[in-house]
Image (cartoon, rainbow, N blue to C red):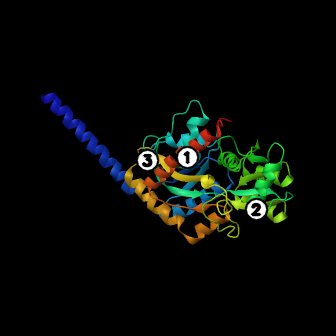
Amino acid sequence: MQNIRGWWTRATAGALLAWAAMGAAAADYPERPVRLVVSVQPGGATDIAARTVAHKLGERLGQSVVVENKPGAATRLGTEFVTKARPDGYTLGLFFGIAGLFQLMFDDYAPLQPGKDFDAVTLFARAPSFLAVNAALPVHSVADFIAYAKQKNGGPSFGHSGNASTTNLGALALLKSVGVAGIGVAYKGNGPTAVAIAAGDIDFGLIDYPSARPMVERGAIRLIAITEPRRSPLRPDLPTTGEQGITRSIDGVTPWFFLAAPAGTPPAVIALLNRQVNEVLKLPEVVERLQAAGVDAEGSTPAQAVERFQADRERLTGIARDLGVSLKN
């Protein structure tokens, strides 16, 4: 009995010391630069948003926040790097909502679970998608688009960024809502898709504003709607698809991302990061910079980020099931 009591005392003391050490580490956080992993190539809207916020966050924390790009496998590589990192607050990641579909994209992947694989910090931003068509087409509104889609033999062609991408699921859902089929062509991102639309290689695509803007200004692409519940400050003159009579089932089928840390990161560190990042996302210069990159700043509690992640996973899984499409590339 005495041995058991002694073991229990040592175990309890060890646990208390571990918690005390964790609390002390959180109180001193950060003592060195923090790494922010971004799962896409440098230069795009997500990367610009990450670097903008990282700079301001570093000023507030008193330590540099260094962006490290780890693209590949539909953002899986960067996401996995973060989930396997030490949970000390010095490795963070921007996780895309599409990460909730990894188990449908890869045969060897179990569903990503909040609290087990990662701890959410806050909603970060979303990149609204616009319905873009080749400017030579007789399409100036959603009504025109529907008429054109229904009369074209084989259905309209569209560009997307992969089977599991929101650009593919959104386009297929849009076509299904108006009762037509379409021909999808995969490209390596919104930029190449915009070039293909402008060249007339495809009829339309759901793309972000920065990718479309040069071709819009050149008169090669026409934007006819935004696939969001609200109009965008980037183009407040442009009505939503819902305003033009399209089912709202495609509202918000658009890229979004949130800040996350490895599971087990001290709650005090999560709370500090949540508070500081949310304050940064409200700064006028940050909001303006992100909007110029085609991104809308968000911000939330950790619980709200988890709720969005789980709801979006369920929603996109349902859309893929209803469409009868495979998400494997």
Callout 3: SS: loop
Amino acid marked by disc 3: Asp
Q: Position of residue 245 (x, y in %)?
A: 67, 59
Q: Is 230 left or right of 172, judged from the image as shown?
A: left
Residue at image point 54% right, 57% down = 124
Query: Looking at the figure, which quarter contains the C terminus?
Result: top right
Q: Is residue 135 above or below residue 77?
A: below
**Few, some or many residues within 10 Å of mark 3 (<14, 14–19, 20+):** some
Q: Is 278 left or right of 52, judged from the image as shown?
A: left
**Few, some or many residues within 10 Å of mark 2 (<14, 14–19, 20+):** some
Residue at image point 56% right, 36% down = 103
Using the rendered image of the protein, determine whether residue 61 is visible from the camera's viewpoint.
Answer: no
Q: What residue sits right under mark 1 in the picture?
A: 315
- Specify the label residue 88 is tagged with: 3
- Which is more foreground, mark 3 or mark 1? 1
Amino acid marked by disc 2: Ser
Callout 2: SS: loop
Instruction: State the separation of the CA atoms marked 3 and 1.
Output: 32 Å
Observer-nearest of 91 and 310: 310
Q: What residue sits right under mark 2 in the picture?
A: 141
| Res. 207 image quadrant | bottom right
Callout 1: SS: helix
Amino acid marked by disc 1: Arg
Lower position in the chain sequence, tag 2 or tag 3: 3
Instruction: State the separation of the CA atoms marked 1 and 2.
Output: 27 Å
**Few, some or many residues within 10 Å of mark 1 (<14, 14–19, 20+):** some
Observer-nearest of 156 and 280: 156
The outermost residue toward the left is 1
Please say if the residues under marks 2 and 3 sit with CB atoms less than 8 Å apart: no
Q: Is residue 128 above or below residue 323?
A: below
